[in-house]
Amino acid sequence: IHTCGYVNRDSTAGKAPFQQLLKLQPPTFNSDDQHETKPRPDGRDPALCDQHEWSDTVAAFPRAEHGGPPERGTAGGHPQAGGAMSMTETEMKEKRVPLSVVNKGVRIQTTREVVTEKYTPSDPSKASAVLADAYEQCKKITAVFAKTFYLGTKLMTEEQKTAVWAIYVWCRRTDDLVDGPRAMMSPETMRADLAAWEERLYEVWDGRPEDSLDLALLDTKRRYPDMELEPFLDMIQGMIMDTPQLGQDRYQTWDELYLYCYRVASTVGLMCLPVMGTAKGYTFEQAKEPAIALGIALQITNILRDVGEDAVRGRIYLPLEDLERFGVTEQNLINGVMDENYKNLIKFEIQRARDYYALSQEGIPMLAPEARLSVQAAGDMYGEILNKIEANDYDNFRKRAFVSKFEKFSVLPKSWATVSAMPKE
């Protein structure tokens, strides 16, 4: 899972007008990452309100200004990518996905019964503790599974970082769903699991979290009401593209790979953009276009780093049209053949990634000043992977393009200098 990138060039779904949703005070966080809230007039904890109140509030507003988000079961507006995935309520209860995240021995509980028992507005201190613990779990999971991403969040404000951790954890769980053993069982099983996960996402958006990690995402949505549903649905479709028997293990053209890169990487930026905010004089729509390149650049970088590992698994992400152009066969990749043709291919792909990094740079000044350094640093740190590939003489079969923590921190002065030169507003 990756850092930032933005809107699908093929997508024009509407935006839900949640600006007036839940007129509650947003939570604040102290330096110890403990959740604090301002009291409501009725004495209830604003961090958690009753699920029925959430539902009633959501129902009071139209879902979208331009036709609404994709209907449930339409695969994020792209039914051709995975087919309809709608299920009845009975089927949902029978096939509910018992997802969990294992974090170095810490198993995250994900049953509705446990969380519903804790999720009690009549006990404000208990409800607040559940939410604080949910964010703490999100922090731990992010720190373990996304080290570079986590370092980037260290440069954010307290409110921003907790929101981004919650978003990352949802992405991580989605990825774990298609990488788990159930994904190998049958296409029907995987399709049902993905349908359940998509329906569960809708329930979060409607104010009915299934567990404490869903609760963190729900609270993030409440704090940043401009956060849209569509990128989350699109990421599910990106996971389908990586799923055995449902997805694909070859990409004929760059356009095909671009769609994949958008769905699995650029969507994360769309999720996070409301959290980051925009600078004075810029809108979210303006920030999306130049920033989309960052998600694409990051995913190309991942692909180049992992060519050898992916080939062992029978997966080739580099466009086949590029292989043909440079005289590299699929068998060469699978066998790890290093020759001049292959080096020229990797040089070409590295330049493509750098071109997208350069395009993304136009969007950094459009972000709110306090959000720029984290995004700039994430891009700079990830860009170092390309330098490592070059230093390894383009051998990404036998050598890992590893950037140490020290090397990542060494990039920060450059990132800081770049951001410091930008207008402050």
Image: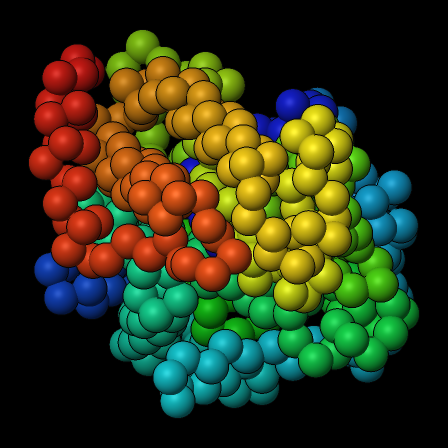
Percent x, y of residue 409: 15, 49
Point 45% across, 44% down: residue: 394
Report the quarter where the C terminus lies: top left
Percent x, y of residue 78: 80, 39
Residue 90 seen in this snapshot: yes
| Residue 337 to residue 177: above or below | above
Q: Residue furthest top?
A: 281
For residue 424, which quarter of the picture? top left
Residue 275 seen in this snapshot: no
| Residue 161 to residue 358: above or below | below
Q: Nearer the viewer, residue 64 or 337?
A: 337
Point 28% across, 53% down: residue: 403
Percent x, y of residue 304: 51, 45
| Residue 377 relative to residue 276: left or right | left
| Residue 164 relative to residue 190: left or right | left
The tally of labels here is 0
Point 79% across, 52% down: residue: 248
Q: Nearer the viewer, residue 297 or 262?
A: 297
